[in-house]
Image (cartoon, helix red, strand yellow):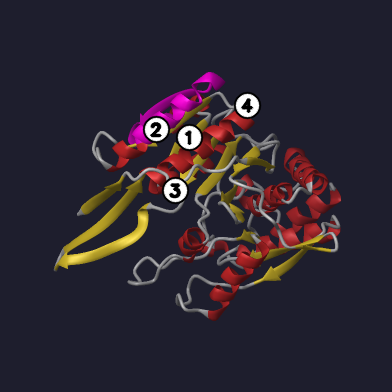
């Protein structure tokens, strides 16, 4: 059974003014404050966690491209695996590195389905460092035709509560209670992030995705909070609407062009991000990021490990490369970001080098060197 706890305490203090950061396109990511990154002698130190599955291969592609493009980034690499226990020394060291450097690039870590007491390392990092906003852009890429055209929407997901609160217990043999925690404080924080994102990127509409018709207290609080925040942005001309999550799923696969910015609680964001990725070409091309007050972590927007193709040199590294481009814009290295983003665009547009997910037979290595040749 599912129990819901709703907390409606007001914000203890108003959030400070958000400052802009750009990402893999011309998109600006709102932040609560400028993050002081680890920089020495004009070079930045970034934490790198390649992840499980295809992570080593896609991370290697990023490192090879950065070296060819003379990007002033030094890596602190930690080969963390989701298969290890929560007290794993390497995992602890990687989190300490993120605390030092403030910025990280990460592949996807595997989370066992049936291991009781084994928490997701992906969720742990985001919650421990309070990287509360997940941002994924779903947009058609020239040279990679899909069923739908003119798709261009942003998914903004609350990262730190909801069904991912990790509060489960068996109250009686055969009866399990899982707590879904929704607070006004965190709902307001993610709603403001969504509207600031829309305002800074000339987006026209924010849609709140919810299930308030059934979960009237929890999702009802999330929806009401979004509506309250929307009133504060009324003068900006940004339209606000809301949609029940099951209807939103149908609308996404039938008419995705109607969406612009979507904001939602944790679990819905996970599901909708996967649907969005499927609309524009799959997990191999969708970049993403996680933003908080102090830390930023960049990772593929569609969180798939790719264990089935691990070690075959067939993975599409575009999602990891474009996530690293988002990271470069975050660091203020726009020239390097533009150079690499344009090289990826040229590579895909030419159609000469396509990995199997794009309908070709090229390898990860082929794609990497094609990007380098287009720098």
Quick check: marks 1 and 2 in contact, CB under 8 Å?
yes
Which of discs 4 and 1 lies nearer the camera? The answer is: 4
Left or right placement of residue 116 versus residue 14 in this view: left
Classify mark 2: residues with Cα within 10 Å, few (<14), some (14-19) or many (20+).
many
Q: Give the CA separation, mark 3 to mark 4.
A: 25 Å
Rendered image quadrant of residue 101: bottom right
Q: Does the magenta stretch include residue 1?
A: no
Question: Residue sitting at 39 percent across and 71 percent down?
Answer: 118
Q: Is mark 1 on a helix, strand or loop?
A: strand
Q: Distance between the residues labelled 1 and 2?
A: 10 Å
Q: Dots 3 and 4: beta carbons under 8 Å?
A: no
Asked if one can make out residue 143 in the rendered structure from this viewpoint, the answer is yes
Q: What stretch is highlighted in magenta?
A: 223-251
Examine the rendering and report whether any part of residue 56 can be seen.
no
**Residue that badge 2 annotates:** 248
- Residue named by callout 3: 270
Q: Earlier in the sequence, mark 2 or mark 3?
A: 2
Judge whether 107 appears above or below 318 on screen: below
Q: Give the mark nearer the N terminus: 1 vs 2.
A: 2
Residue appearing at x 45%, y 77% in the figure: 85
Element carrying mark 3 = helix
In the image, residue 94 lies at what x, y percent? 60, 71
Give the CA distance from mark 1 to mark 3. 12 Å
Q: Which numbered disc covers residue 275?
A: none
Residue under label 4: 202
Location of the N terminus by quadrant is: bottom left
Mark 1 Cα shell of 10 Å, populated few (<14), some (14-19), many (≥20): many
């Amino acid at each position: 059974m599912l129990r819901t706890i709703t907390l409606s305490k007001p914000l203890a203090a108003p959030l400070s003014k958000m400052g802009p950061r750009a990402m893999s396109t011309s998109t600006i990511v709102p932040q609560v404050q400028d993050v002081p990154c680890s920089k020495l002698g004009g070079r930045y130190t970034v934490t790198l966690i390649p992840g499980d599955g295809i992570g080593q291969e896609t991370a290697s592609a990023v490192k090879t491209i950065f070296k060819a493009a003379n990007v002033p980034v030094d890596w602190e690499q930690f080969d963390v695996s989701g298969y290890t226990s929560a007290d794993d020394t390497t995992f602890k060291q990687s989190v300490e590195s993120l605390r030092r450097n403030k910025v990280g690039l990460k592949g996807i870590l595997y989370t066992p389905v049936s291991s009781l007491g084994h928490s997701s390392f992906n969720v742990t990092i985001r919650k421990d460092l309070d990287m509360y906003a997940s941002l994924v852009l779903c947009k058609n890429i020239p040279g990679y035709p899909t069923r739908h055209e003119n798709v261009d929407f942003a998914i903004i997901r609350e990262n730190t509560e909801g069904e991912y609160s990790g509060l489960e217990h068996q109250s009686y043999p055969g009866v399990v209670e899982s707590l879904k925690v929704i607070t006004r404080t965190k709902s307001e924080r993610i709603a403001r992030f969504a509207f600031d994102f829309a305002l800074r990127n000339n987006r026209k509409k924010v849609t709140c995705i919810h299930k308030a018709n059934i979960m009237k207290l929890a999702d009802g609080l999330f929806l009401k909070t979004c509506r309250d925040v929307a009133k504060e942005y009324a003068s900006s001309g940004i339209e606000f609407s809301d949609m029940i999550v099951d209807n939103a799923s149908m609308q996404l696969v039938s008419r995705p062009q109607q969406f612009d910015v979507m904001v939602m609680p944790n679990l819905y964001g996970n599901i909708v991000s996967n649907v969005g990725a499927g609309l524009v070409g799959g997990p191999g091309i969708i970049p993403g990021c996680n933003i908080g007050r102090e830390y930023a972590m960049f990772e593929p927007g569609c969180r798939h490990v790719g264990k089935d193709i691990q070690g075959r040199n067939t993975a599409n590294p575009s999602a990891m490369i474009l996530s690293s481009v988002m990271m470069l814009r975050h660091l203020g290295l726009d020239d390097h970001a533009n150079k690499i983003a344009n090289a990826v665009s040229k590579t895909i547009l030419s159609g000469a080098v396509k990995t199997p997910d794009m309908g070709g037979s090229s390898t990860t290595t082929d794609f990497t060197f094609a990007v380098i040749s287009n720098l």
